Every structure is written in structure tokens, then in C-alpha cells.
Amino acid sequence: MSSVVIVGASRGIGRELVRQYLGDGWTVVATARTPDQVAELAATGAHAFHADTTDEASLTSLAAAAPRPHDLLIINAGVGAREMNLATVDAEAWAEVMAVNALGPMLAARALGGTVRDGGTIVALSSTLGSIGANSGGGLYTYRMSKAALNAGLKTLSIELKRRDIAVAALHPGWVKTDMGGAGAEVGVEDSVTGLRAVIAGLTPAKTGAFLDYRGNALPW
């Protein structure tokens, strides 16, 4: 039976990932940040644990306690930020977004990477807003910077893990109808996750280091 760890599974894309992988018979290890959310995940049939990507001790505890080995690690945790010009960027808020969106996923990969089997897959949810090459609209400084930093980290990780034949990728889920994306977003959660899963299934060591959207299209860094 295949096994997946989903970090950040309390709602939205993360919760739908849990639902779909469980539905296909996978063993699912899922994380949330509050006791109530952990209990809700456990009720779905997932192995549910507390973890916070800004708390490395919680990630280390998760790695020790969760069933293993795993075929797939999905790092989904993230927060939004919407300032549209440099004058409104708050330094403290910037540091928090960078910690959650950029450093947090890399800490999760460090803590949990050893539980992923050789030849497995590690992905993290990024965004086209992290693309420098596709940035024609400006604004959203903090969010763009955090996702660009995440992309750089994942690309570098893909090189480090080639020796273990682990495929690493940054994935853009689309503009999804979640709490973060809002009701006016273009893509339903189920459609986004279905697409993401197809892209993940197609990743191989030969394709490691990719930046792809949920339809499998390559995105500019």
C-alpha cells in the first residue's frame, strides 16, 4: 500500500488531498496545528498528528511517531499576504510570511525527508506569484518573495536528493476557491487536487527540479 504525508491538511487543498488519497486506498499521514483539527483529520481515517512548520521540534516528533516509510511527502502549509506597494510592507509581517511560506517547508523537508523512501517524491505547494519570469503585474511583495524563496529552496533540494532518486517539484495549484483564494477564484478544490495528483504521479527522478501547475504545464522560474 502506498503512503503519503500531507503537511498542512486541516482545510482546503490539504483536506481534499487527504480525502482523495484515502479514497484511493493510500495510507495517509496528515497534520494540523490545533487539537480540534487533528481530531477532525483522525475521524477521516488518516493518521493524524500535530505539526507546525515554524516549530521544528513538532516536525521532528512527527518524523519519529508517524508510520514509515513513505512514497510521497506533500508540504501544503502556507499563508497569504496582500500588500500592493512597497510602502505598505510591514517588516514584522514579512518575516512571519517568509518563515511560514519559505523556511517552514524546507524545515519540513529536512525533518521528514529521511522518512521518504529512495525513489519517492517530495513536493511543496508554490504559486505562479513566486515566478520572477512571469511577474508582469507587480504588487504582493511579501507573498511573491516568500514563494520565490521557496522555489529556490526546492530547486536546490532536488539537486541534493538526486543521489536518492527522489523527485522534487514546486507545484502551483491554480487560483483555488479556498479561504485564501476566495470565492471568486477560478478553480474548484476538487479539480485542483485531482490535477495535482496526476502531476505528482507523473514525476520521476529524470523530471526532478520542476516548477509545474496543476495541469502539468511548466512554469518560468
Image (cartoon, grey):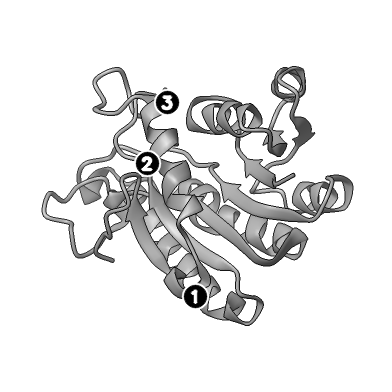
Looking at the image, residue 186 lies above or below residue 54:
above
In the picture, the quarter occupied by the N terminus is top right
Q: Residue flagged by tag 3: what amino acid is it?
A: Glu
Q: What's the mark number on residue 173?
A: 2
Nearer-N-terminus badge (2/1)? 1
Q: Residue at x 60, y 69 (%)?
A: 166
Q: Is residue 176 left or right of residue 51?
A: left
Which residue in the structure is indicated by mark 3?
190
Position of 135 relative to 20 (above/below) = below
Residue plotted at (77% across, 23% down): 42
Above-or-below relation of 146 to 215: below
Q: What element carries label 3?
A: helix
Mark 3: few/some/many CA within 10 Å (<14, 14-19, 20+): some
State how far apart marks 2 and 1 are (Cα): 21 Å
Asked if one can make out residue 94 in the rendered structure from this viewpoint, the answer is: no
Does the image show residue 82? yes
Lower sequence index among marks 3 and 2: 2
Q: Is mark 2 on a helix, strand or loop?
A: loop
The quadrant in which residue 160 appears is: bottom right
Q: Where is residue 88 in the image (x, y as percent from the top left)?
A: 27, 42
**Residue 102 locus on image (x, y percent):** 49, 56
